[in-house]
Image (cartoon, rainbow, N blue to C red):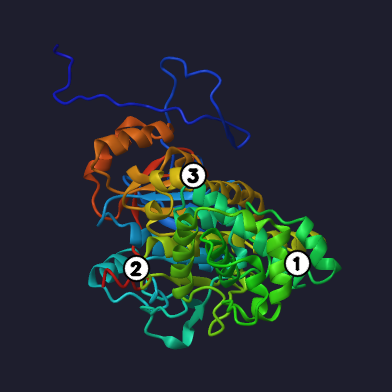
Amino acid sequence: MASMPRYHGRVQVELLGEELDGVLIPPRLRPLPNSPVFVLDIDETARTLRLEGDIPLGVPVGYEQITASIPSDKKSVLPRHIGILGTTGGGKSTTVSLLISGFQQAGIATIVIDTEGEYTEIYQPTRDHTMLTALAKRGSAARGVEPVSVYHLVGRETTCPDKGRTRAFSLQFSQLSPYLVIGMLDLNDAQQQRYQKAYDITKRILLDLNIFPANEAEKQQMFELDEMETGYPKMLAQHVYDVVKACAELAGGDKTIDDFADPDYRFYTPQFQQGRAKVAMAFKKEGADQVSHPTSWRVIQGRLGQLIRLKIFDNRAAGPLTYRDLTLPGTVSIIDLSDTDSPQINNLVIAEFLRGLMEAQNENYRDAEAHSTSQRRAMIIIEEAHEFLSAERVRQMPVLYQQVARIARRGRKRWLGLTFVTQLPQHLPDEVLGLVNNYVLHKIGDANVINRLKRSLGVVDDSLWNRLPNLAPGQAVVAMSSFARPLLLNIDPTPCKLRMVE
């Protein structure tokens, strides 16, 4: 006992690997007893932990002279998707805006699905005193992000005060998978079958009226159509509404098919009105005279009517977006959904954006391959991801999750990354967590949520999990596929303005 020092403790050592010819590989054997121990200098520590990159995140706790960064040019990192999780006030918005700034400087096209209007003034430098003080300590200055464009649904307001950088857009009904629409309308099994019947009749009418396909190229496009991914070209919500309304009248005995050829019968769309005889013939070809259960048809008619009254589909006052423009290197696009007041509309917009951006990246990839040019890189940041991909919504709308999963898998090869941001990670299903390979975990106090995340993120050791409930604002446990191990970081302050913070 005489040789025992007054103060003593235990140190847990983790073997990161064995360095051979400058490369860190998994250790073959553990060190022999009494092996010499050498302290690494700052540069060697950063290199060993693989913290080099061009997008800075923050400072590892205990290593004030090191900046932990992530590389923007490796497909093994950002395109393998990011989860930013934590309770309100933990610093998620700061992390997101810091990443937006870093992505822009790295030449990555960034698209932010902003459900609260938080980032619509990110083009301005921060004026928050706390952020300015923290920036000065880090030797950085406040600055905004440019170029920034803000998009909002037609007929809805935006929180961006600079109207010169805002643009309204409308959704294209023809781009929405019929199975996705069925899920959004919340139809039961019988109503789903009737909607599918109406959809098939509408396709027949568009064919007979020579609306689509109208030429050989469009006929080839029809053969290649995947309705799990997209809808029927040139089909409007009003087209389907006309068919559903007519089927409801047939089922109720109010009309016969011959009545639809009568000039006095009024269709919603001028195209159907002008081609009444062919429309009636299409109903006969598809056996519409056999439809039944008018009440079920009326339910579908009512819900379609609600969608049409929103005036967000095929609106002439605002055209669709050109998704390839959103993937231009270094651009930042904010999709402001703060004025929609409807999770269903938000989900429609998000689903359409994911589909459109994946299609744009496919075209970019083909062009890069054909012309031997560099691949465009894009990141999509989805705020309040629990409202879009909650466990309940995935159960109700499996097609929605399947679409996201396909985009997540294909996006890795096409350089399209997804970032899911949520304050309620407990609402995200295991299927969604399984798509994510990089995590930024801010303060999480719920032990059940931590235990669930432990099962998904086996790479984080218990000492870091134990610190999650007590993290200070701005601190986060970061597990990036480029890091040698997860680390506790003090996230850098954002140089940009955040509306909900300032």
Type of residue at label 3? Val
Which residue lies at the image location 39% right of the left edge and 45% below the top edge? 392
From the top left corner, tell me how far across and down residue 94 is, in percent: 34, 62
Q: Earlier in the sequence, mark 3 or mark 2?
A: 2
From the top left corner, tell me how far across and down residue 178 is, in percent: 59, 56
From the top left corner, tell me how far across and down residue 165 is, in percent: 48, 83
Q: Which labelled disc corresponds to residue 436?
A: 3
From the top left corner, tell me how far across and down residue 351 is, in percent: 52, 59
Helix, strand or loop for disc 3: loop
Other residues around mark 2 within 10 Å, as few (<14) / some (14–19) / many (≥20): few
Q: CA distance from mark 2 to mark 1?
A: 37 Å
Front residue of this view, candidates 253 and 293: 253
Q: CA distance from mark 3 to mark 2?
A: 28 Å
Front residue of this view, candidates 27 and 245: 245
Q: Quadrant of the N terminus?
A: top left
Q: Which residue is mark 1?
A: 207
* Residue at far top of view: 1
Are dots 3 and 2 in contact, CB under 8 Å? no
